Amino acid sequence: DYPQDALAALKERNAFVNDRNPIDISAPSMSNMEITGGHLKWGLERNLPTMIGYISHVPLVPRTRSGIMPQLLKFRDAHPGQLIAIAANLHPEDRSALVKTGVAVFDDPSVATESVAKLVRAGQAFEKPPNMPTAPGGFEDLSDALAAAGITLVTETVVDDAGAAVRMLDGPIVLKLSASTLRHKTELGGVMTALSSPESVRAAFADLSAKVARHNDTYPDLCITASRHVNGVEFLIGVRRDPHFGPLVVLGSGGVDCQIFDDLTCRKAPFGPPDAAAMVDAVMVSKKLAGWRGAPPANRAMLETALVSLSGAAAQLPSFEVNPVMVGTDALRAVDLVMGDDQ
């Protein structure tokens, strides 16, 4: 809100001003540029961190231009640490002079307000301390954080033969390669999804077994796991620990799409629901959440809640990446989890 003492000072000079922010200094003040400039000046003197002034065509009119421009040009000298934005119609030379002093100049007050709001939010983010612990948590801490965020890890079972995999058929299943140092299973062709018949399971197991033999020297603990096939919209969710910004929460399209289309966004943790909603809107796959070609709508609210929850725990977590997280109608299920800085 506009400071009450500044508002009272304005009313002493111009009784027509309104009582709340944004302040309308009213037409009578147009005859007195000291009042017009004083509106901004009195707010700045009371250490308001951000001021936006809309003075329309005042700087274009010769009579008022001579009274207002000297005041505007002095604002930054007296208040070098404050963000000042002016929305006005200006002569080109006046615009250049204001910009040189460090004043942000706009033609449209709506654009000015939106731009300043984004700058303020960015500044608030940079003011947050990195808060990076010297010893981030391990797998148990991460599992607890995912559970608290409403994300369920899909259970994987090691299968030693095709028969064991077939016996798991109770609906479609997924077979994939797994090893402690294998980060991207798809690079080895190591993921077979939506297997719904004994024949398809046996064929997939044979294919993966050949790859185990081929890559066993590189991945000595390479094995085949089976899990239930999960439907939903595929997202990537993770935390990265940046040395300058601290923990960042990452969201992107799931599978390989995040890399193919560079479809990733991130926010400095912690953050609230508005930032979570903005992250979801920023990735292309979010368009599928409302339902696509007959698919049921996915639970966007659960996804946003999970992002906020993980952002609150991010400082205590190691770097990790869950890809994909399947966003369904009533659940979030993590299909694959990778920990470490090289995910």
Image (spheres, helix red, strand yellow):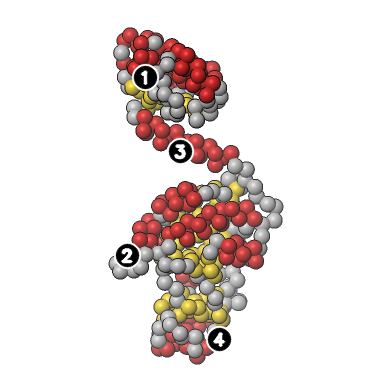
Q: Amino acid at mark 4?
A: Asp
Residue at 54%, 70% in the rendered image: 153
Q: Which badge, 4 or 1, is on the more N-terminal residue? A: 1
- Which label number is shown at residue 118? 3
Q: Which badge, 3 or 2, is on the more N-terminal residue? A: 3
In depth, the one of 295 and 183 nearer the eye is: 295
Q: Using the numbered discs, state the Cα–Cα distance from disc 3 to disc 2 in whole angstroms.
A: 32 Å
Q: Eyeballing the image, is 53 above or below 297?
A: above
Mark 1 falls on what kind of element?
Answer: loop
In depth, the one of 96 and 288 nearer the eye is: 288
Quadrant showing the C terminus: bottom right
Q: Which residue is mark 1?
A: 26
- Which label number is shown at residue 160? 4
Q: Position of residue 119 (x, y in %)?
A: 47, 36
Residue at 54%, 21% in the rendered image: 5
Q: Amino acid at mark 3?
A: Lys
Mark 4 falls on what kind of element?
Answer: loop
Q: Which class describes the residues within 10 Å of circle 4: few (<14), some (14-19), or many (20+)?
A: few
Residue at 54%, 42% in the rendered image: 125
Q: Amino acid at mark 2?
A: Trp
Q: Amino acid at mark 1?
A: Ser
**Which quadrant of the figure has residue 207?**
bottom left
Q: Position of residue 195 (x, y in %)?
A: 41, 81
Q: Using the numbered discs, state the Cα–Cα distance from disc 3 to disc 4 in whole angstroms.
A: 55 Å
The nearer-to-camera label among 3 and 4 is 3
- Which label number is shown at residue 292? 2
